[in-house]
Amino acid sequence: MGIEKKTGLILTGGGARAAYQVGVLQALSEILWEAGWPPARNPFEIICGTSAGAINATALACRADNFGEGVQKLLDVWLHIEVGQVYRADSLGVIRSGARWLSLLSFGWLLRKWHAAPPNSLLDNTPLISLLHRMLDLPRLDAALADGLLHALAVTASSYSGGQHMTFYQSATAVEPWIRTQRVALPDQIGVQHLLASAAIPFIFPSVPLYIGGHREYCGDGSMRQLAPISPAIHLGASKVLVVGAGRLAELNGGAPEAASYPTLAQIAGHALSSIFLDGLAVDIERLNRINLTLSMLPDELLAKTPLKPVELLVIAPSERLDDIASRHVASLPAPMRAMLAGIGATEARGAALASYLLFEASYTSELIRLGQGDTRARKADVLAFFGA
């Protein structure tokens, strides 16, 4: 593995939408194999993930000694996933968390008995812990780093306690931590708790305590306050970066409907989540492209004096609206979840954005995987050029 040119992978957040990333990785593996790369060869020295993307990133990094096996493991999980593997969707689980939480929002001033111990989130994601233990092989991650098969893994979370965006990274060699406005980097041994924190979608999943600098901070989804999603890969030494999104980065402006009705709670929540998961990435891509353009105009003597370096960027993102796809699969959710989501408008087409983050069902994730495969194959020439294959 060269020390000068390192390729980074950025897997963004988005709950169940992260299934799309697996389709991209599977098609990418296939394209490189057809170009003569050994199936086991890991094309990424640096792997970074946020939210559900952090889970995919860590599972992939754990098998950096066999990229094809890592992709197949992710495929096996996402092609057969059920919501019960991620959060409690049975009647009792929904009543204990979701219904109780919504009732507190509506009538909390009447329900004094809950003031001492209010519900923490809309859903109980305790089952996710077991799924993570099945997906990950953390000792194998340590071995891959020690053997030079991987340079670094980074996952991000957001601290509710301290207000900062935090990148936790584990690297083969010492990397100086970086500090920027509202964001810090911390070397650490990546574990299940980091992933639970990174994937804790605000309001929907409970925050997770992490011990940082000897004190406890409660953390949530890493997409919150993520001003520069691509920067961890660059700080860790990447000179070229593949970014896999979990939603369309540019929407056609069709204008407002002629007679818009008042938005449902689900519609507002979906809009807020899309802002958290998509806007930061779109802005960072635009920023990086501007920097690359500016650097390309500098003469060599000035380029040598700036700490900025050009970064080759390839972005693969869904070509279809995942909200629309989700609206076709809401019926696959367990009845208790459908009932709860129907109460806030998430089973309607205009509220499907919220459902698109919670639809951990094989019918939906399989369609996202197929979309990721198709979008990547359509970019085959770009993929081959990016990897010099």
Image: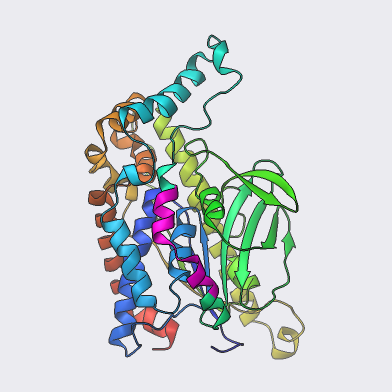
Please state the total of marks drawn on the protein image: 0
On screen, residue 235 above or below 301: above
In the rendered view, tell whether residue 111 sits above or below residue 251: above
Of 258 and 229, nearer the camera is: 229
Query: On the image, which quarter does residue 341 sit in?
Result: top left
The colour scheme of the drawn protein is rainbow
Q: Is residue 139 magenta?
A: yes
Left or right: where does residue 28 sit relative to residue 329? Answer: right
Q: In the image, 151: left or right of 247?
A: right
Q: Is residue 268 left or right of residue 80?
A: right
Q: Quadrant of the C terminus?
A: bottom left
Q: Where does the magenta region start and end?
A: 129-142
Residue 250 in sight from this viewpoint: no
**Magenta residues: mostly which secondary structure?**
helix
**Residue at the outermost right position:** 305
The reply to whether residue 179 is visible in this rendering is yes
277 or 37, which lies in front? 37
Position of residue 210 measured from the top left corner of the image (x, y, whole percent): 64, 48
Q: Going 45% across and 18% down the picture, which residue do you hit?
A: 103
**In x, y percent, where is residue 348?**
29, 32
Q: Residue at x 29, y 29 (%)?
A: 336
Q: Is residue 360 inside the magenta stretch?
A: no
Foreground pick, 259 / 303: 303
In this picture, residue 80 sits left or right of residue 12: left
Q: Residue furthest top?
A: 110
The picture places residue 23, in percent across and down from the top left corner, at 31, 65
Task: Estimate the x, y position of residue 132 in percent, counting from the top left.
Answer: 43, 55
Query: Residue placed at 60% from the left, 75% from the top?
Result: 292
